[in-house]
Each structure stands twice: as structure tokens, then as C-alpha cells.
Image (cartoon, rainbow, N blue to C red):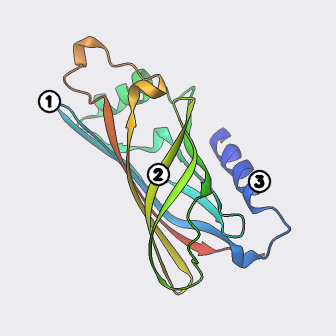
Amino acid sequence: MRSNLIFLSLAMFLVGFAFPASDKYMAQRGVVRFKSDAPLELIEAKSNLLKGVIDMKDRAFAFSVEMSSFEGFNSPLQREHFNENYMETKHFKVATFTGKIIDKEDFSKDGSYTIRTKGQLTVHGISKERIIKSEVTTKGGIIKVRSNFTVLLDEHGIAIPRIVYQKIAEEISVEVEADFVGMID
């Protein structure tokens, strides 16, 4: 519930009421996948609950995902450890990325673009400024965003106990896919 309020606040901040609805897009579908490829174990999980909003006029965006919504893993115990020991999802419920689109592409025209975004990536309660490249395809009023990047656990205060050091990678691969549609007033 609290994470939905956080996202709604971000969305309201970005969307505002002074701009035409055609400048604002909301994620209709969003997926986040992560992979920890350590020497002794490969861990993969995904969430289909990525939320996002883009304001094309201001070139601003906000994404969020509830950390407890990730599924997959190699076992239920592994998911439990992810939520309780590493991500501490009772305290740090969401991960967010908010910021601006750096490049000046015209997304009103159908096409494919490689863009850079700059913003604050917040994971485990710690925000880091990041520049993340994304592939954007626009066609018929739908904007598809695809991005791959890495997250260093240490930068976000996520410690790996020595006993499982060979089973959890220090650098996590993240893949994001989202389809955006224009919002209507």
C-alpha cells in the first residue's frame, strides 16, 4: 500500500495538470528481470509489476517496482533470503529510478532511438545518480522502452555474507521492458 502511494506521488509530480494529456505516458505493461551470475550459482528473478510514467514535454520520468514482487529464484528459501536478508523488503519496499531524458529525440515520430537518461536510482534505501542507456521504439502512439544495466550491491549497502560469497554476484544484471501509452485527461 505504501509503495503505491510513493509511486502515485511520483506520478502526480511528473504529470501535473498544466500540460496536455498527449505529453504524458503511463506504463501499460512493465517487467524487470535481474540475474546474479556468481561462480557457484545463477540466480534469476522477475517482476511483472513495474510501474512508470513519462512526461515528454518535460522529458521527465519515474519508474518503480515493489521489491517483494520478484518471482523465479531457484527455491522458495532463496526468495525468502532475498526479501529478508538482502533487500530487507519490509523496510525498503520499492526500488525507483526518476530523472530526465538527456537526448533530444522527437518521440512523436515513429522510429527507433538509443537514448540516455540521467536520474536517481534508489535501491535498498540508497540513491545513486546514474546515466542509463535505453532503446526506445515508437509506433502508433505506443512507446516501448528496453534497457540493460548493472547494479553494484555494495553501492546500495547490500552486504554479501562470506559464507555465500561464491553464490551471489557483487554486480547484478538488470533488464527493464515497458510499453507506454498516452494518458487521457
Q: Are marks 2 and 3 in contact (CB under 8 Å)?
A: no
Locate residue 29, reporting x and y percent. Answer: 49, 65
Locate residue 108, reporting x and y percent. Answer: 60, 82
Residue on which the image places disc 1: 39
Disc 3 marks a residue whose amino acid type is Phe
Q: Please state, as top left, top right, bottom left or bottom right, where the N terminus lies in the image.
A: top right
Choose the circle earlier in sequence order: 2 or 3. Answer: 3
Quarter of image, res 92: top right
Q: Secondary structure at mark 2?
A: strand
Residue at 63%, 61% (x, y): give it: 53
Q: What number of labels is visible?
A: 3
Residue at 56%, 50% (x, y): give it: 118
In this rendering, the answer to whether 124 lies above or below 69 is: above
Locate residue 75, reporting x and y percent. Answer: 25, 35
The reply, left or right, for residue 53 in relation to residue 12 is left
Residue on which the image places disc 3: 13
Choose the circle earlier in sequence order: 1 or 2. Answer: 1
Q: Residues within 10 Å of mark 3 (few under 14, many from 20)?
A: few
Residue found at the far right of this picture:
18
Disc 2/disc 3 C-alpha distance (Å): 22 Å
Kindly tell me whether residue 58 is visible in this rendering. yes
Residue at 39%, 28% (x, y): give it: 153
Disc 3/disc 1 C-alpha distance (Å): 43 Å
Kindly tell me whether residue 184 is visible in this rendering. no
In this rendering, the answer to whether 174 lies above or below 180 is: above
Quarter of image, res 103: bottom right
